[in-house]
Amino acid sequence: MNRRTAIAAIATGAAATATAQTAPYKIKNGRIKQSVVPWCFNPMPVEELARHSAAMGLKSVELCDPKHWPLLKELGMTCAIAGSHGFAKGFAHREEWAECHAKLRQNIEACAAAGVERIITFSGFRRGISDDEGIKNMVAGLKEIAGFAEEKKVTLCVEMLNSRDATQMKGHPDYFCDSMERTVEICKQVGSPRCKVLFDLYHVQIMHGDVISRIHQHKDYIAHVHTAGVPGRNEIGGTQELNYPPLMKALLEIGYTGFVGQEFIPVNPDKIASLAQGVEICDV
């Protein structure tokens, strides 16, 4: 270790210690492995969010640029799920496959090299196609990449998004995989242990409700979980309709061992206080 590296390490350690001393909540039970999604906390830098999260006992900052992965490792964390192509394009339309496949292959390689076990993928928008055509396209397109994901030991996580809320980043009108049942059926037909669903509790509540029943019903296909308050995609406390402690207990009941990513948009100007509240609520 040279002088510059040593100074940087000391500075990082000092910053982490200072953050830990002021952490508003520290995970006590740890039965739910918690993560956080950075975009919700903009303009807070990922580095700052990561240090606060580590101090609280979170195990991951997810969907962040791979350039941040070394810092996460230094903090004893990981990236629970990596990004790929955006939700505007996906496998429901064959003309979008090439771009999606290329981005997924590139990022799956990076995941395998860094020990990141999951990667997100999307259906894209319906744009007039029928359920049957969209499902057929999704299955065929995902099958073409599933073998590579199996080889690299990285799980494709198809995210269901709600199509009811037209507010930017709170809903996605015309999104094809706006049904958990349709999304799970696609994964069933792909038939790969490395193709599962991202079960976003916020989106499932908006489109379906009956969330705990669906957790049990689809337990074999849940590879990752996201949170947010309904309505509004804000804090997950007592001002919204989902009751998160029973949802976390339902995940434990099905033997879920993956991550729960906090993906709510804080209303409170003290974003870290809101994150700490969410972490405490889910620490069942």
Image (cartoon, helix red, strand yellow):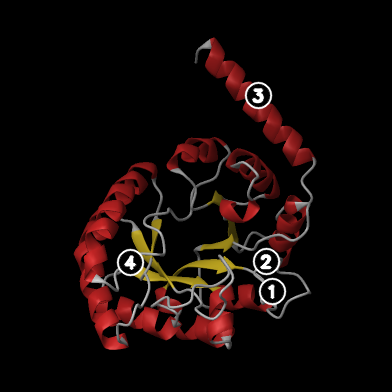
Q: Which residue is mark 1?
A: 245
278 relative to 156 in the view: left or right: right
176 relative to 209 in the view: left or right: left
Q: Which residue is mark 3?
A: 11
Please report whichever mark, 3 or 4, sits nearer to the chain's N-terminal start: 3
**Of residues 126 and 205, which is closer to you in this image?**
126
Q: Residue 137: x percent and y percent?
A: 24, 76
Q: In the rendered image, which quarter is residue 239 located in?
A: bottom right
- Return the mark for residue 282: 2
User: Identity of the amino acid at label 4?
Assistant: Gly
User: Identity of the amino acid at label 1?
Assistant: Pro
Residue at the image position 22 percent from the left and 59 percent from the top: 98
At label 4, counting other C-alpha atoms closer than 10 Å, the crowd grade (few under 14, some 14-19, many 20 or more) is many
Q: Secondary structure at mark 1?
A: helix
Total labels: the figure holds 4
Compute the Cα span from label 2 to label 3.
Answer: 31 Å
User: Identity of the amino acid at label 3?
Assistant: Ala
Q: Residue 129: x percent and y percent?
A: 30, 82
Compute the Cα span from label 3 to label 4.
Answer: 42 Å
Above or below for 150 versus 38: below
68 relative to 129 in the view: left or right: right
Q: Is residue 129 visible?
A: yes
Q: Secondary structure at mark 4?
A: loop
